[in-house]
Image (cartoon, coloured by chain):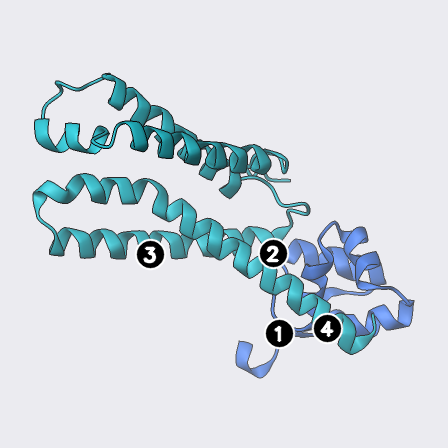
Chain colours: A blue, B cyan
């Protein structure tokens, strides 16, 4: 699963720590998600999408290997 | 929010203290009583030594180590989020794998008289391996986050 978290953060001029604070996780977790080392739970994905005011699908997309 | 049944973050220090305090006590006991609990168990094979001084000492020191390891292993991280929960679960699974691999290996390649040592090993090995593995993956996670910071400048 790929994501556009880094881009969304850049648009909002938000650091990993800022986003981590808003969704109540560690900065390391945001970093792992951005580098595709960790796939967030549905709950966390929804929280992240809410921060950016977008739907989950606009931020997280399935890849061919996931299908 | 689901309950995660973990001890508060600070209890790990109490756990470390218990383990550290246990070491000189055990060394002193072994120095003054070189034929401590091990011999009483293996030679008697009965309950004749139950609650004798070496047995009580054994219970005390084992409890100190066990409680210490439990507190270190199952205390919360500073930020206990879902990734940490997954790493914790993953480490626990590896600890169980290793424990049963060693247990199986020991049962095949040792005779009945040595089962006491296998039991002793099983008391602390899974917890110790869990702690080492869990702390190692957290260390790697932090290192990876730091290296990404220097790459991206964020």
CA–CA distance in space, label 4 to label 3: 32 Å
Residue at coordinates 36% horizontally, 24% vertically from top-left? B60
CA–CA distance in space, label 1 to label 2: 16 Å
- For disc 4, the marked residue is B148
Q: Quadrant of the C terminus of chain B?
A: bottom right
- Neighbor class of circle 4 (other Cα within 10 Å; few <14, some 14-19, many 20+) is some
Q: Position of residue B103 (x, y in %)?
A: 23, 51
Q: Is residue B141 above or below residue B20?
A: below
Q: Does label 4 lie on the same chain as label 1?
A: no
Residue at coordinates 77% horizontally, 56% vertically from top-left? A20
**Front disc: 1 or 2:** 2
Residue at coordinates 28% horizontally, 45% vertically from top-left? B121
Mark 1: which secondary structure? Answer: loop
Q: Quadrant of the N terminus of chain B?
A: top right
**Front disc: 1 or 4:** 4
- For disc 2, the marked residue is B83
Q: Chain of mark 4?
A: B
């Amino acid at each position: 699963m790929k994501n556009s978290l880094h881009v969304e953060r850049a648009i909002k001029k938000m650091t990993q720590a800022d986003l981590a604070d808003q969704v109540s996780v560690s900065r390391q977790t945001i970093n792992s998600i951005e580098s595709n080392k960790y796939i967030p739970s549905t709950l966390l994905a929804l929280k992240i999408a809410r921060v950016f005011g977008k739907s989950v699908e606009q931020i997280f997309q399935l890849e061919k290997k996931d299908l | 929010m689901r309950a995660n049944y973990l001890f508060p973050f600070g209890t790990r220090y109490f756990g470390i203290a218990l383990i550290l305090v246990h070491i000189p006590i055990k060394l002193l006991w072994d120095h003054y009583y070189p034929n401590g609990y091990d011999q009483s168990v293996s030679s008697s094979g009965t309950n004749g030594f139950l609650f004798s001084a070496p047995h009580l000492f054994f219970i005390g020191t084992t409890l100190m180590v066990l409680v210490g390891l439990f507190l270190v292993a199952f205390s919360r991280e500073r930020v206990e989020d879902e990734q940490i929960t997954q790493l914790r679960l993953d480490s626990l699974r590896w600890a169980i794998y290793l424990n049963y691999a060693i247990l199986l290996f020991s049962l095949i390649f040792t005779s009945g008289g040595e089962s006491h040592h296998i039991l002793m090993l099983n008391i602390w090995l899974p917890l110790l391996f869990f702690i080492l593995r869990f702390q190692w993956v957290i260390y790697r996670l932090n290192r990876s986050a730091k290296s990404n910071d220097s790459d991206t400048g964020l």
